[in-house]
Amino acid sequence: MHEHSNVAAQHAMYPEDKLNQIIAVAPGVVFQFQVDAKGELSFPYASPRLFEGNGNNSVSAKNAKDVLKLIHPDDLDRVADSIEVSRHKALPWQCDFRVHHENQLKWVRGRANQARGSQGTILWNGMILDITDLKAAQLKLEESERQLRQAQQLASIGHWYAKIEADEVYWSDIVFKIFGLAQEHSYPSVELFRRHVHPEDLPQLLEHEERAKDSGTLDFEHRIIRPNGTIGWVHLIGRLNHLNGTFHGTIQDITERKHAERELREHATTDPLTKLYNRRFFLERSEGTIKLCQRLEKPVTVVMFDLDRFKVVNDTYGHATGDNVLKRIASTVKSMLRAEDVLGRIGGEEFAMTLPDTRLLQGVQVAEKLRQKIEQLEFDAPGKQDVFKLTCSFGVTQRENPQQSLDTLLALADEALYTAKNNGRNRVETKLQTKALR
């Protein structure tokens, strides 16, 4: 028996006013929509509420065009397309759209099952529900998600989850961007992630992962290597769900922050011209070196040197040339020292070195090699055809007992340097508290 005849039978069983009373308690509008063989549209039946409101008493169930006028103009094409798809593919109809009702704009959801009537008629029996509040919540959620995505992009934060033992991994779009990976060519996995962790940081990361299995918290900053060879920094945060063994967390690109921190650290510790330690940090590092040598019962030597007649260079060739001289000498000296040696610029053209595990005569040998090397350097004079050379004078001392402070050693080295200047410059002199050598 056709749906149309079913509705007719229902009308026969129930007077229309009784049927409307029953349907009035339904959560939405009950309707039957028809397209006849000629393509004419009508509503053979609909709850009275479908036609109420808007102060429009001329809406006719026989002419569906009047009903369709209630649909928001921007949604009409979408509704029409959904009907055509349902009609031609014999599928149930469903569509969310806006309607004007009681001078308000509301969101509704229509659902209907399709049935074939007589003489080529197609019927849809269904219901329309008011989803205005649901849609408002959905739109609010979508806006919140859009703002979250925008905030994550601005902060370069991606989210992820991973079941490490099963190698089940999910990355948000931002994670691919952070790692410099093409999303369409990359499949997230534990192996892929670890492959891009800097080799020097990977052992620590694995240790953090193991500890996180007990603590439930993963928090680690480490370097990554992108496919193009650039090195970045990321901050990895995760929380473990002990029930299913899955980590959920975020990963943020902190490369710019790390670079800024390095610049601040260099500004606080480094002489901006020569890139050697500045006076304050030289003293700090030297104090630590002396304490370490004392604890290990190792000797330590302090050397001071400065450029001979450097004022003549500035006066003759200008301060820019003088700066170039300082930078080149600083680079030369640094290249000839060990990694554990402490070198700093402590004045205009004055430098100091703290040499751990070095006795006085060994310190003299280091100073002499540096003196000879500097004496051989040739410097260009901008705008002039000639080149010029420069010499340095050195003062060396050794820590003789635990009571001698760094200040004392620097004062002794400075005295030896002063002696070198008075004895003709371009030489190495020594000074101890008890006696002087050379």
Image (tube, rainbow, N blue to C red):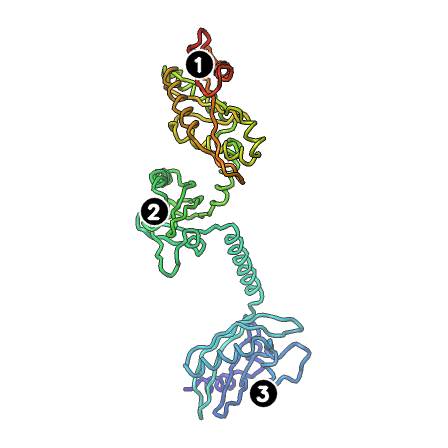
Mark 2 and 3 residues: CB-CB less than 8 Å, in contact? no
User: Would you name the residue on which mark 2 appears?
Assistant: 194
Residue 144 placed where, x, y %? 55, 57
Residue 313 placed where, x, y %? 54, 30
Residue 76 placed where, x, y %? 56, 78
The mark that comes first in sequence, 1 or 2, is: 2
Q: What is the residue that sits farthest to the right in this orientation?
A: 55
Closer to the camera in the image, 411 or 182: 411
Three-letter amino acid code of the residue under disc 3: Asn
User: Would you name the residue on which mark 3 appears?
Assistant: 63
Placement of 168 over or under 239, stated as above or below: below
The mark that comes first in sequence, 3 or 1, is: 3
Q: What is the residue that sits farthest to the top in this orientation?
A: 434
Three-letter amino acid code of the residue under disc 1: Thr
Number of numbered callouts drawn = 3
Give the residue drawn at x 45%, y 80%: 85
Name the image quarter holding residue 15: bottom right
Q: Secondary structure at mark 3?
A: loop
Q: Is residue 342 visible?
A: yes
Sort mark 3 into few (<14), some (14-19) or many (20+) by Cα contacts within 10 Å.
some
Q: Secondary structure at mark 2?
A: helix
Q: What is the residue that sits farthest to the front in this orientation?
A: 385
User: Would you name the residue on which mark 1 appears?
Assistant: 430
Closer to the camera in the image, 136 or 223: 223
Q: Alpha-carbon distance for marks 2 and 3?
A: 66 Å
